[in-house]
Image: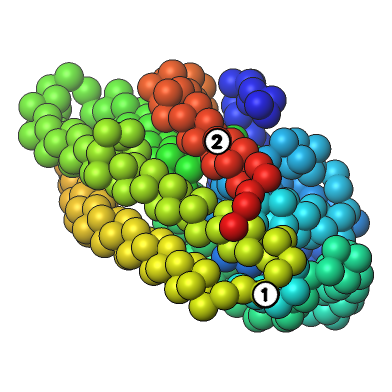
Amino acid sequence: MKKTLKFTSILVSLLLAFAILPLTACKDKDDGKEAKIMNVSLNPKVEFILDKDDKVVTVNALNEEGNLIISAEAFVNVEGMSAKDAAELFVKVSKESGFLVEGSIGDNALEISITGDEENAQKLYESVKGEITGYLSSINVTVDVTKVKAYTEAELEEIVSQVCLYLSDEEIAKLNYDELIAKLQESRKETAEYYSQELKNTYYAMKSVAMQKAELNALKEHAGLLASAAIASAESIYDSAVEALMIARNALVDENGAYQIALADLRAKKVEYLNYRKGLVESGVEITETQTNILNGLEQAFNNAEAGLLGIGESANTAISNAEASLKSAFDAVISAIETLGVKVNEHLNEISAKQKSALTEFTTEFETAYASAKAKAEADWEAMYNELTEETAA
């Protein structure tokens, strides 16, 4: 099993995030762009944030199958690894788990995107491609390695907005490239060992709520006791909106819920398909029509399971989007009620910041406790899937 992330590690990251919360400077279009984002995709999709020396700072799955890859024991020491070695490790674990097979059968196409200074990004891509191509040749795997477009500024801002829900669009727009990467990096560190896309999303959403509540508490202290009745009605609606969001988010995390059951089914069907395909290739004999038909049937079963999972996810995300819209409206209504009483947010930014720092300490502990089971189950499920995929198989 992988190392356990300590509460203090998350708290340090959270407090570092606060160091650049006041976003007053104008965006510098000519900032250095020393850090980079390297995405490697082979069906499993994984993101590596790199420092100025092209060493890995954080690794993050961009889809559920990416969690299978990065939860492997080999990824324990990925931080500090060179971009070339990290990309090779991604390929190695993908080969071990059956996503890559010898020859050219299957979905052997690997895509790499590198976001950063264009000239340096191109040099890094060529270096990484050379390393991967050489490694693949040594293990007799044929793969088309292609470069795909880097993130645009708007796309990078959107990604940061998804993990920093507590920041407004205006605040994010003021961040330059290096500040955006810093925000993303901090958020990735906070969820580094949550091997579940939905659990990470729940963390980001609940963190934002914790910061909202801290802001409201700071402002309410200045509204005075006589104002409590005027604020209570708006705050009651806000609390109901928070509860609705938590219910919608938890529907995707609950191990007995439809989404997690469908995800387990998807894992099982993927294992069956990948193991059968791997067995065919490693048998070294000509593949028969019957075997091809069986393989196609297993692939179709997997595709059907994936479509079912996506359907459940889309329905749940609609409920989440509605809950988020209601929450924003309710939060704005409470702020408006407080400001009507003469309390202005901009006059109490230091107090709000202090309250939020304190609230985040409590939030981190509470979240780790409340979702400990979901966190452990996600890691155990991917470990079990990896073990099934790396066992000897026979066609």
Q: How many other residues sit within 10 Å of disc 2, few (<14), some (14-19) or many (≥20)?
A: few
Q: Which mark is residue 350?
A: none
Q: Relative to 10, is 245 above or below?
A: below
The answer to whether 113 appears left or right of 163 in the picture is right
Q: Amino acid at mark 2?
A: Ala
Q: Cβ–Cβ below 8 Å for labels 1 and 2?
A: no
Q: CA distance from mark 1 to mark 2?
A: 31 Å
Could you tell me residue 334's position as x and y percent? Answer: 20, 41
Q: Residue at 45% of width from left, 23% of height from top?
A: 372
Q: Quadrant of the N terminus?
A: top right
Q: Amino acid at mark 1?
A: Glu
The secondary element bearing badge 2 is classed as: helix
The secondary element bearing badge 1 is classed as: loop
Using the image as rendered, state which of residue 294 and residue 222 is in the foreground: 294
The answer to whether 350 appears left or right of 92 in the picture is left
Comparing marks 1 and 2, which lies closer to the viewer? 1
Could you tell me residue 393's position as x and y percent? Answer: 63, 49
Q: Residue beneath label 1, please?
A: 286
Q: Which mark is residue 384?
A: 2
Could you tell me residue 37's position as x and y percent? Answer: 71, 62
